[in-house]
């Protein structure tokens, strides 16, 4: 089992940047495909980005492609989400998630994640 804790959220102006971190404990994060999701009030949870176990493959949701970058440091058991050119519609609670995966390179599917963090709030203001 893996325990996930997100950090780095906060208030940022439209067009600004933030970097979220997800620290894993209880199990080696390199055994898991990792993902970021978000949920705004009164909406369903949305897929943001995922990264393969090795870190060599990534996949993004259409709404963040070209603006967000997911990365991982398996030596530190940490996953990151660099968010640039933030928009008002990026406001949400962001969740880190882990998915057991037999593949070192696969990034799909984007569903069926096994473990979730508590989330960190990101608010983009005008």
Image (cartoon, helix red, strand yellow):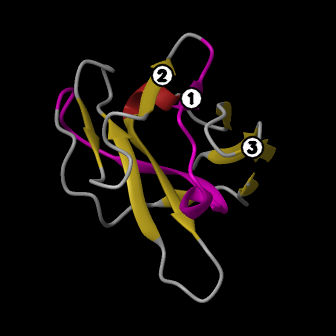
Residue occupied by mark 1 = 80
Instruction: Report, in whole angstroms, how far the alpha carbon at label 2 lies from the one at label 1.
Output: 6 Å
Residue at 35% across / 42% down in the picture? Answer: 50
Q: Do the residues labelled 1 and 3 touch (CB within 8 Å)?
A: no
Residue occupied by mark 2 = 72
Q: Mark 2: few, some, or many residues within 10 Å (few <14, many ≥20)?
A: many
Q: Is residue 25 magenta?
A: no
Q: Which residue lies furthest to the front in this view?
A: 126
Residue 89 against residue 32 in the figure, above or below: below
Task: Give the magenta part as a residue range.
Answer: 76-105
Horizontal side, residue 73 vs residue 55: left or right? right
- Identify the secondary structure beneath mark 2: strand
Chain-order first, disc 1 or disc 3:
3
Residue occupied by mark 3 = 13
Q: Mark 1: few, some, or many residues within 10 Å (few <14, many ≥20)?
A: many
Measured from the top left, where is residue 44 in percent x and y?
48, 82
Residue 121 against residue 86 in the figure, above or below: below
Residue at 73% across / 54% down in the picture? Answer: 126
Measured from the top left, where is residue 110 in percent x and y?
27, 58
Residue 12 - label = none
Residue 116 against residue 67 in the figure, above or below: below
Instruction: Report, in whole angstroms, how far the alpha carbon at label 2 lies from the one at label 3.
Output: 26 Å
């Amino acid at each position: 089992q893996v325990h996930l804790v997100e950090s780095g959220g906060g208030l940022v102006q439209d067009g600004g940047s933030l970097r979220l971190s997800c620290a894993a404990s209880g199990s080696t994060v390199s055994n898991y495909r990792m993902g970021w999701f978000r949920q705004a009030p009164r909406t369903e949870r949305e897929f943001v980005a995922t990264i393969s176990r090795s870190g060599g493959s990534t996949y993004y949701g259409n709404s963040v492609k070209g603006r967000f970058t997911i990365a991982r440091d398996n030596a530190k058991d940490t996953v990151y989400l660099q968010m640039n050119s933030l928009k008002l519609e990026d406001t949400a609670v962001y969740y880190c998630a882990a998915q057991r995966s037999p593949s070192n390179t696969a990034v799909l599917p984007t569903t069926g994640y096994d473990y979730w963090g508590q989330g960190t709030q990101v608010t983009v203001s005008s």
